[in-house]
């Protein structure tokens, strides 16, 4: 499913007059529903221009977006629009017609702004238009397309808007991309202007050229040589410019970039999944200092810095969570990868026969399917393929594969098998070269024969609606780096001491373990002792936790000296919480859910010197009060309080000294936000949802106090936004305050 989201790094270059024109069309007094179409070739900045009118616009009280592209499903588009304002987890269970009815009912009561991006055919517009009611309240739709006929078909009142090229001055803003806030060197000004002129006003060209220049020495001769390479007009060959950017990549980054060709157009790509795939494909060079996962993230940062990859989602404190590449660049990756015999993309219902370009030479090759076929057993010509990745086939449905072991019997050299969107009945445990395995299954357990996959580094299993039994033989997979099971996984711990202690082997390389289910704290400790180098851990505690003699004891986790991210979830909130908590001092992100938190426990958390992100969800405070003392939470940057019964919250002036973002969701009993945040100079963002009006008013007071105290424009609340937030049970207001420039 495509969930559109704006990039934190996306920036609109120029187009000030264009933006003002479209802004006028959006807010004019005419009450009827109108469609503002933005038309232009690839790379002209249509999407960036459209998304500059985002949810920060207080004129509208509902905002939604979907990205259509050439391959789409109606259900996915509806889910994308609704997910901007509703919980997508429950929505995904509904049929397309039910979603359409839900969306229409919501929009009937709202003045809405929708962005329908990258529409390729009239049929896609026809699939959606009946969901957009005209309540004559000034609602608007922004549609972007490369095709004039689509814009003409969608027209209501406003004529289609054709994107113009950037003018000379706007093109010269190229320098901003290269040097940021630094002063542009005088000796590079003349050649820089020549390069900007050759971009001929095409934003994509400007972005790509900036990515090239960023990595070059800031010497006039180097820039002059680059300018001569561009020829007369860069725009004459946008793909040639992509090729030039690709050729300029270090050798180690080239396979990483071509690998984007294995993904669907306009789909967000999980950064954690992408880096795990790169690692399993042996694209990452070990420098002996950093772990492979961190090096892979550095590779991605390099590609982002060259403007070849776009960030679409950020994590709580700024790390990249999801990304994608522009359509033109995706086309290049597919074509170049096929040309180099690196990757072959096979579309649904097509290419029923095995590809013929494969030779018998055992070189690295990758097959990427957008298909529900499972007749691969006869593809003997492809037996040297090293990687097979199945992409989703749409409608949030999975294709089914009966006997994976038989189907992949000819693929003896596979190192990567991505069946995340394929429901498998049996695990292909004969493929002992596998380093990456992702599957979806309805089975209750993983077979013990998985021990045959002794090269396995990443194991991802999706099992909806139940727990998955892990075999004891999993401990023999000493090369494992990432294990991710959803919804939860457990070991058979009857006679736990014997089953976990009789085999002393450890998973020393395991960095991520999610989500492990335990019923006793000592069982958790046994697992921890076998995984000493964990960096990320998500564990689920059973209802019966604490029923034994040590009912108030929390598992000893402080031995995990490298643990940076921890999430602890209780299936239901115990009446009695642990008397003492212990966490690794290196912890940077902590999430507690349904957790009874005694005063000593919150003090332990407050003393974690490296903690940067804290999320408390349905956590119970003693007496529903929380007092934060001097010097507590010294490095915390992000604080989220969700569905707490907290009523009284007192914070010392010397606490939360580095806090940048504060999120309050469902804290309906909270009396007010502490006024100490008036003088928190680092605070940039406050979000309030489903809280009392008193809390919302207290945020407004913070803004006023900052103005009175003489804060600069970058330190006071720059934006006050009220948008409608719709849940599955009704509607409530979402208040977002921005305290500084968006990061």
Image: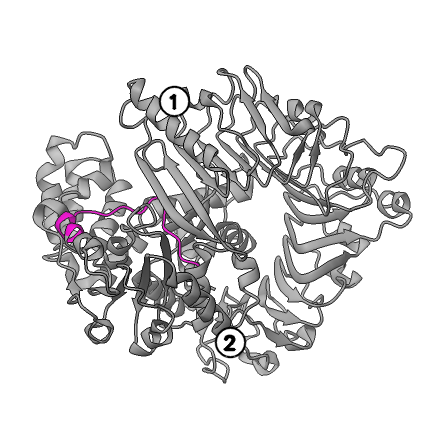
The residue shown at (54%, 75%) is 382
Query: How far apart, in angstroms, are the residues tagged by discs 1 and 2?
Result: 52 Å
Give x and y (percent) for residue 739. 36, 31
Mark 1 vs mark 2, foreground winner is 1
Q: Nearer the viewer, residue 580 or 307?
A: 580
For the question of whether residue 301 can be seen, the reply is yes
Q: Does 373 appear above or below 42?
A: below
Left-right relation of 99 to 460: left
Q: Is 15 within the magenta?
A: yes
Question: In the image, which residues are magenta?
Answer: 3-20
Give x and y (percent) for residue 457. 63, 52
Q: Secondary structure at mark 1?
A: loop
Magenta stretch prevailing secondary structure: loop
Q: Earlier in the sequence, mark 1 or mark 2?
A: 2
Q: Which residue is mark 1?
A: 681
Q: Secondary structure at mark 2?
A: loop
> Which label number is shown at residue 371?
2
């Amino acid at each position: 499913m495509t969930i559109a989201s704006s990039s934190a790094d996306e920036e609109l270059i120029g187009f000030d007059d264009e933006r003002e024109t479209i802004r006028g069309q959006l807010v004019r007094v005419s009450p009827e529903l109108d469609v503002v179409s933005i038309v232009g070739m690839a790379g002209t900045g249509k999407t960036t221009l459209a998304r500059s009118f985002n949810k920060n616009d207080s004129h509208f009280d509902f905002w939604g977006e979907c990205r259509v592209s050439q391959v789409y499903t109606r259900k996915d588009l509806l889910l994308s629009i609704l997910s901007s304002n509703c919980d997508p987890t429950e929505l995904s269970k509904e049929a397309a017609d039910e979603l359409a009815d839900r969306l229409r009912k919501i929009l009937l009561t709202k003045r809405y702004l929708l962005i329908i991006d990258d529409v390729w055919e009239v049929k896609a517009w026809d699939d959606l238009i009946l969901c957009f009611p005209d309540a004559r309240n000034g609602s608007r739709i922004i549609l972007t397309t490369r095709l004039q006929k689509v814009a003409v078909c969608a027209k209501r009142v406003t004529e289609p808007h054709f994107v113009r090229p950037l003018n000379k001055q706007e093109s010269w803003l190229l320098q901003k991309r290269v040097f940021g806030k630094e002063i542009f060197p005088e000796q590079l000004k003349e050649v820089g202007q020549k390069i900007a002129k050759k971009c001929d006003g095409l934003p994509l060209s400007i972005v790509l050229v900036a990515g090239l220049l960023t990595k070059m020495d800031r010497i006039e001769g180097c820039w002059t040589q680059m300018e001569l390479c561009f020829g007369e007009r860069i725009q004459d060959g946008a793909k040639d410019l992509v090729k030039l950017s690709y050729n300029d990549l270090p050798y180690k980054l080239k396979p990483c970039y071509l690998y984007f060709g294995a993904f669907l157009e306009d789909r967000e790509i999980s950064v954690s999944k992408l880096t795990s795939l790169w690692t399993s494909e042996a694209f990452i060079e070990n420098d002996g200092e950093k772990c492979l996962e961190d090096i892979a993230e550095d590779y991605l940062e390099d590609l982002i810095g060259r403007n070849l990859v776009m960030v679409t989602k950020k994590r709580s404190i700024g790390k990249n969570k999801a990304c994608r590449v522009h359509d033109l660049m995706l086309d290049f990756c597919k074509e170049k990868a096929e040309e180099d015999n690196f990757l072959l993309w096979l579309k649904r219902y097509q290419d029923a026969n095995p590809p013929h370009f494969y030779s018998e030479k055992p070189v690295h090759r990758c097959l990427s399917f957008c298909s529900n076929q499972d007749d691969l057993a006869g593809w003997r010509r492809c037996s040297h393929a090293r990687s097979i990745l199945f992409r989703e086939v749409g409608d949030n449905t999975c294709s089914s594969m009966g006997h994976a072991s038989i189907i992949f019997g000819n693929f003896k050299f596979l190192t990567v098998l991505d069946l995340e969107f394929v429901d498998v009945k049996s695990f292909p445990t004969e493929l002992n070269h596998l380093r990456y395995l992702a599957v979806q299954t309805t089975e209750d357990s993983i077979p013990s024969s998985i021990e045959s996959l002794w090269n396995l580094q990443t194991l991802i299993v999706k099992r909806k609606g139940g727990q998955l039994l892990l075999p004891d033989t999993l401990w023999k997979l000493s090369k494992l780096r990432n294990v991710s099971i959803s919804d939860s996984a457990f070991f058979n711990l009857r006679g736990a001491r014997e089953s976990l202690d009789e085999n002393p082997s450890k998973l020393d390389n395991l960095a991520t373990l999610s989500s492990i289910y335990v019923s006793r704290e000592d069982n958790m400790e046994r697992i921890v002792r076998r995984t000493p180098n964990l960096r990320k851990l998500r564990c689920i505690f059973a209802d019966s936790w604490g029923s034994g003699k040590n009912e108030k004891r929390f598992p000893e986790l402080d031995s995990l000296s490298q643990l940076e991210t921890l999430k602890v979830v209780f299936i239901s909130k115990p009446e009695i919480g642990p008397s003492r908590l212990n966490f690794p001092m290196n912890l940077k992100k902590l999430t507690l859910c349904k957790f009874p938190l005694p005063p000593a426990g919150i003090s332990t958390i407050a003393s974690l010197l490296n903690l940067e992100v804290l999320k408390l969800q349905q956590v119970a405070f003693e007496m529903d009060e929380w007092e934060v003392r001097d010097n507590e939470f010294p490095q915390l940057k992000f604080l989220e309080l969700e569905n707490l019964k907290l009523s009284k919250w007192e914070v010392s002036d010397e606490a939360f000294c580095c806090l940048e973002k504060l999120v309050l969701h469902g804290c309906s009993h909270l009396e007010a936000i502490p006024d100490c945040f008036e003088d928190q100079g680092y605070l940039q963002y406050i979000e309030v949802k489903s809280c009392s009006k008193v809390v919302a008013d207290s945020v407004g007071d913070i803004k006023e106090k900052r103005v009175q105290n003489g804060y600069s424009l970058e330190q006071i609340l720059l934006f006050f936004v009220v948008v409608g937030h719709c849940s599955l049970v009704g509607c409530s207001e979402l208040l977002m305050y921005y305290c500084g420039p968006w990061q």
